[in-house]
Amino acid sequence: MTDDSPGTESESESESGSGSRTRHDRITRHPTAGPRNSLAFWTDAKHPLRIAINYVVVWLVRISPSLRLKRWLMRRIGVTVGDDVSWGLEATPDVFWPELITLEDHAIVGYDATLLCHEFLQDEYRTGEVVVGERAMIGAGAIVLPGVEIGAEARVAANSLVTRDVEPGTTVAGVPARPMGGDSDDDTGATADEADENESGER
């Protein structure tokens, strides 16, 4: 669950003024009726058996040391996975709507990162695709919100909260994530251990 408010008014104005689409433009809203919050209606959003299957597969993806197995498992639950994608230990794809995730060729998702494609709020739940571009890197512990697109060769620093699109080749960091002053600070948190999996994990 996340709070999907667009942020401050100045942020919303700056995004809309740029003329480009934001993650909020790509989110689908699903209103729920009555006084209860939207999470109370989760069984209407997705069949419980489907969630149970997704949960077991996601658990295996999180703990498996084999990148080949991780890619195979994620494809089974609907994630679009490109060639040679590296998915770190404990990293978590969305359990409810994994089919909304696209990982393009050679992307890296670091240790304990989370890609969210849904948000349960008070009066509605929202869904949105997450796209990680070719050769993009997401650092350890980072969280990517629904509707976000991360461009090719972009870098997300460790423990960042990505609330808006990341332009190709850009490095972002912080909560919320913002472009860094210089891309030479390549502190994404995708450690050498993740790279080592490319060899030790290909079994």
Image (cartoon, grey):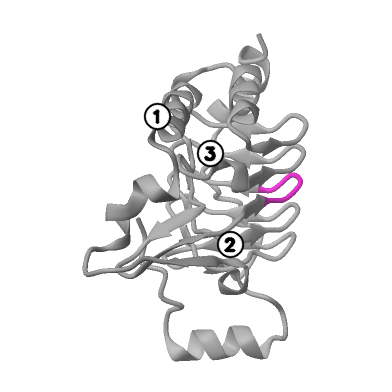
Q: Nearer the viewer, residue 186 or 43?
A: 43
Q: Is residue 189 magenta?
A: no
Q: Residues within 10 Å of mark 3 (few under 14, many from 20)?
A: many
What is the C-alpha distance between the residues marked 3 and 2? Answer: 20 Å
Whether tag 3 and tag 1 are in contact, CB under 8 A, the answer is: no
What whole-number distance in Å separates the C-alpha atoms at marks 3 and 1?
Answer: 25 Å
- Per the image, the residue denoted by label 2 is 147
Give above or below for 89 relative to 122. above
Q: Decide whether the magenta segment is chiefly helix, strand or loop.
A: loop
In the rendered image, residue 134 lying in the magenta stretch gets the answer yes
- Quadrant assignment, res 109: top right
Relative horizontal placement of residue 197, taking residue 176 as reference (left or right):
right
Q: Which marked residue is nearer to the observer: mark 3 or mark 2? A: 2
Cα–Cα gap, marks 1 and 2: 24 Å
Q: Which mark is first along the chain, 2 or 1? A: 1
The image quadrant where one finds the N terminus is: bottom left
Q: Which residues are magenta?
A: 132-136
Which one is in front, 24 or 113?
24
Q: State the quadrant of the C terminus.
A: top right
**Which labelled disc corresponds to residue 52?**
1
Camera-near label (3 vs 1) is 1
Q: Which residue is mark 3?
A: 110
Amino acid under disc 1: Ala
The amino acid marked with disc number 2 is Gly
- Decide: is 156 above or below 104: below
Q: Position of residue 46 (x, y in %)?
A: 45, 44
Label total for image: 3
Query: Sequence-wise, which precedes: disc 3 or disc 2?
Result: 3
Comes first in the chain, label 3 or label 1: 1
Identify the residue at horizontal 59%, vertical 23% (top origin): 73
Mark 1 Cα-neighbour bin, 10 Å: few <14, some 14–19, many ≥20: few
Q: Secondary structure at mark 3?
A: loop
